[in-house]
Amino acid sequence: MLIESDFLDQRVNEQRDEFDGIPSDILVGDLFSDVTVSYDAIYDAIDPIIDEMVTPTGWSKDSVIKDVAEKFGVFPTMISDTDTRVVYGDSAKSIAERVLKKYQERIISETAKIFDLKQEIAKAEPHTAEFRNKINELSWRYTSSLKTFDMANLSQLVVRRAAIVEILSLACSKKLDVQKDDNGAKRMDERIIHSIFFPMRKDSRETGDHDIWLLSEEYQYYDYIASDKPLSQIEWSDNSKLFGSDIDQEFENILHRRSEQNGAKRPDIAIFDKEGSAIIIEFKAPGVSLDDHTGDLSEYAHLLLAKSNGRLKKFYGYLIGDTINRMRMPGWTRFPQGKGFFRSTPLQDPETDRHIGELYAETLFFDDIVDRARKRISVYKDRLQVNLSQN
């Protein structure tokens, strides 16, 4: 290829094999530089022409970009925002690396500028105009940086949530690889589904990495979440116990009466708030009929209320599975969409019938949970063009 330019002619050296005064790149923020063109800028101009000449007719740029989004969570908007070129021969990995490197460099540069401005603000004199100018400059610099920070953070969050929803969908359909070959062992479907929502035998003090948002976004911000842990261990921030020490034995007695197989089982997930509300979540393995367990929620709520020394009064209960006998759901209202039911009932003292609390309960199908979660993130998925579906 022959490339001609007056600019290059003026800078060619005596041997005509190199150019003088053309840097590899132009440093951003160098106020004293009179350089207007760099090698990188020249390459940016001629590379697309070369790429067009060597690209085969069957190659699809859109297919590569889609591959980058699905494998690495780097979306077309991010590729465009960083002016990253996608050409024949690029792999999804190499494109993702270039995009993320540009974001990393941009974030480091913008963070450094913000830090420098903070230092200048600390040295400024509040009674001068310069102080206000620095404040204004900092606010604009920080605001412009949010786009960079949020683009990377939001995209990672959306891809992660999209992946969790698809994993839950596969688990509910028994299509995960770990569910396909059980070799005669006891199936772990309920345990697998439980762990997707919240790691088993953990609480929110031990881990903040969970996906309880699948049921409701607001539950992520409750004061305490326990997953299959002794309720007698739960403490408020003042180190006072929420329940009496015998609560776990009481639960064991209830469940022994219902089935010898339940042993020392507790609610699968229990979520508590200092305002006096509690969420009880029970997962039932595929094939177990939910209508056989609707009374469990009421009994759990009564026991939690009695053992909380009056701290808990409002309860939300969820039975989640894939089977129900609709003929055994009198008093329950079916959701307009989906297969589940809901009901709100008062909690009464079994001896005096005195009103002591409220229980709002739902029976939900796994499919309903998946549909709700997909709808919750659909706006962001569509904007970022995320598609992790196995279909």
Image (cartoon, rainbow, N blue to C red):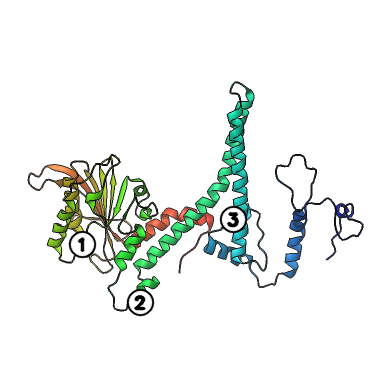
Q: Residue furthest top?
A: 127
Q: Residue at x 63, y 65 (%)?
A: 61
Q: Which residue is mark 2?
A: 181
Q: Which residue is mark 3?
A: 100
Q: What amino acid type should be assigned to the residue bearing mark 2?
A: Asp
On residue 187, the disc is none
Q: Residue furthest right?
A: 14
Q: What amino acid type should be assigned to the residue bearing mark 1?
A: Asp
Q: Is residue 93 left or right of residue 378?
A: right
Q: Residues within 10 Å of mark 3 (few under 14, many from 20)?
A: some
Q: Is residue 380 left or right of residue 44?
A: left
Q: What amino acid type should be assigned to the residue bearing mark 3?
A: Leu
Q: Earlier in the sequence, mark 3 or mark 1?
A: 3
Q: Residue at x 16, y 46 (%)?
A: 306
Marks 3 and 1, Cα distance to the nearest angstrom? 50 Å
Mark 3 in CB contact with mark 2 (< 8 angstroms): no
On residue 291, the disc is 1
Query: In the rendered view, would you say 235 is above or below 201?
Result: above
Q: Provide the secondary structure element on which disc 2 rests.
A: loop
Marks 1 and 2, Cα distance to the nearest angstrom? 29 Å
Query: In the rendered view, would you say 32 is above or below 260?
Result: above
Q: Residue furthest left?
A: 351
Query: In the rendered view, would you say 227 is above or below 346?
Result: below
Is the N terminus in the top left, top right, bottom left or bottom right quadrant? bottom right
Q: Earlier in the sequence, mark 3 or mark 2?
A: 3
Q: Quadrant of residue 273?
A: top left
- Viewer-nearest residue: 58 or 150: 150
- Viewer-nearest residue: 52 or 313: 313
Mark 3 in CB contact with mark 1 (< 8 angstroms): no
Q: Point out residue 36 in the picture as x, y percentages from the top left corner.
A: 79, 47
Marks 3 and 2, Cα distance to the nearest angstrom? 38 Å
Q: Point out residue 284 in the picture as x, y percentages from the top left corner.
A: 26, 63
